[in-house]
Image: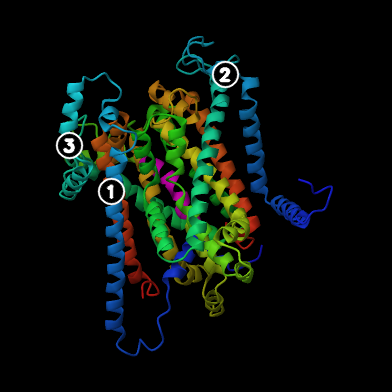
Amino acid sequence: MSIQPTAPDSASAAVDKAAVPVPAGTAARGPRARTTTAYLRYGAAKAGGAAVSLLAVLVTGFFLFRLIPGDPVRTMTGGRPVSAGQLAEYRKEFGLDLPLWEQFTDYCRKALTGDLGTSYQFRTPVIDKITEALPNTLLLTGTAFVLYTALGMFLGTRSAWRHGKLGDKLNTGLALTLYSVPSFWLGLLVIIVFAVGLGPIPGLFPTGGMESGGKEGFAYVLDVAHHLVLPVLTLVAVEYGQTLLVTRSALLDEMGGDYLTTARAKGLRDDLVRRRHAVPNALLPTVTLVFVNLGRTVAGVILVETVFSWPGLGGLFYQALSVPDLPLVQGLFLFFASAVIVMNTLADLVYPLLDPRVGR
Amino acid sequence: MTTGTAPGPRTPAWQRRRRSAARFWRQYRTQRAGLVGLAALALFALVALTAPLTVGSGVTGVTDAPGSPLEAPSGEFPLGTDRFGRNLLGLVVWGARVSLLVGLLAAVLSVVIGTVVGITAGHFRGAYATVLMRITDWFLVMPALVLAIALATVMSRSLGTVILAIGVTSWPTTARLVRAQTLAVESRPYIERAKALGGGHWHVMTRHVLPNVMPLVLAQTTLMISSSVLAEATLAFLGLGDPTVISWGGLLQDAREAGAVSSGDWWYLVPPGIAIAVVALAFTLCGRAVESVLNPRLGVAR
């Protein structure tokens, strides 16, 4: 195997597309003002795109839950025998007796003011259930996100730098294997081994939930951390492979670069060449893909929270869809989709600050 | 095909295709991981296809189950029994049929949508392509599982629903790749020649662009099957699959509902999960091998 600059994969292609060269001569006429307006224009375009995407989410949410096979009330009652009077009452309660257009404007107005309807099974506003569960999800996801991104980038860099060697093969192989494992299954196994206890291994961690109850202050924090270990472990295990592979191929794209030869010719040590020269250039495609893949992380979070009975949004989603509690499923659908779009837009807005080639 | 007898005008084309297929196989053979994946797939396909002969549809019957519920692995039941006393080995073998079928069909649906969107968005420029690519980008960012769950929740529980839910949420990657390839193909002179000779949109797209994106589509299908098998297992585990059929995800859901986790019955959980993981990994390995044969420059990177 030769060290060739590799074909642009989707990551670097995305960057190439964004990296429009700055026309020569603009730098002479006040680079500062020039770049600020360019950045504002870029930011406005991204924000406008995000607004359209959010609107599309809103419309999808409406039609998905109202138009697909016939009668939402029938779906809601789940085939139980209901009298005609009750059906009419449900229709009125959920505003389904109005013309479709009025239903839609009504729905949009309410959604924009934060009113996502009333949960069918809890009989409380959907938005309350979401705000209640959100901090728990953020705690779990945030911890896992930091850990798997760091681990993936670290191992991916090592792997690319020594590509083709045994360590690289083991790393990539393990990452691919964990990537192919269903996250919920891994979670169940982790519970059996580390929480229930298997053979000589005692149950070290709680099987689920977020707290044992009755603890306060520092003991409470420790208790939550204790409950956090296994879900985070599972989430990191299924998600880090993706970051590893992306980092690895992004860095391999840089490996043939002439500037690395120059850096080596200057007499820099190998790990300085890697840390100071190669990795910073490989970082941007990695960051891009880490954010594009947030959608996949949402899936992982839903499953891990379900398996570990974590009281977050994912667990709530599972409770909602097993009824099915349509207002809650719809509300969570809107929330997850909007959150991912907003995060991606934020990432888009941050790149030009990281990499001056983007967005000019 | 009449390639052997009367040499018609199409014979050279077929000979060329046969030659390139042979060349493809020669290069594929050098990919060790790809061969391992292919062997695993052949084994699973054989098991799934011969299941009616080896275990028979009787294994799924709840009423006349051969064992007592939740028996640990033994000589009679190598993998133990499920919560109804059914033979778990038989169920895993039988479940391969549904899991592979749904994975295959969902992947084909997704790749067909992606290819049509990709080719038309690459061929027709202007507003049409812009709108189409915006939709694609929207789907690309959306959490596919959330969308699939929402779809499966509002529709009836059936295999068709699962296939549809996975297929219509997972096509955007294919669409992007195919569009990029279409743009590359359409900039070549022979497309201009075809247009100058009077070739219409349909002719250019089906006769010139499609054969050129086919290898990419093939690799993409292989990779998509892997994620579709995982998605099917996920939906079944969340209780959104068809409750009347046996699939690997459904078996895991059964195990969880039967309390296999809290009682530590690992032998109930391990086999279906390993089956899912091995099939998903095998398709991924094959897909990556096909990719690196088609694009040798990727060989180092992946």
Image height of A159 relative to B81, above or below: below
Work out which residue is located at the far right of the displayed protein and give it.
Answer: B5
- Crowd tier of the residue under label 2, counting other residues whose Cα lies within 10 Å: few below 14, some 14–19, many 20 or above: few
Residue at image coords 27%, 68%: A44
In front of the other: A235 or A292? A292
Q: Give me the residue at 18% from left, 23% from top.
A: A86
- The amino acid type found where label 2 is placed reads Ser
Q: Which residue is mark 2?
A: B57
The residue singled out by tag 3 in the image is A95
Q: Which residues are magenta?
A: A230-245
Q: Secondary structure at mark 2?
A: helix
Report in which chain the residue with disc 1 lies: A
Residue, disc 1: A59
Tell which of B58 and B276 is nearer to you.
Answer: B58
Q: CA distance from mark 1 to mark 2?
A: 44 Å
Left-right relation of B265 to A116:
right
Q: Is residue A306 left or right of residue B277?
A: left
Is residue A237 shown in magenta? yes
Few, some or many residues within 10 Å of mark 1 (<14, 14–19, 20+): some
Magenta span: predominant SS is helix
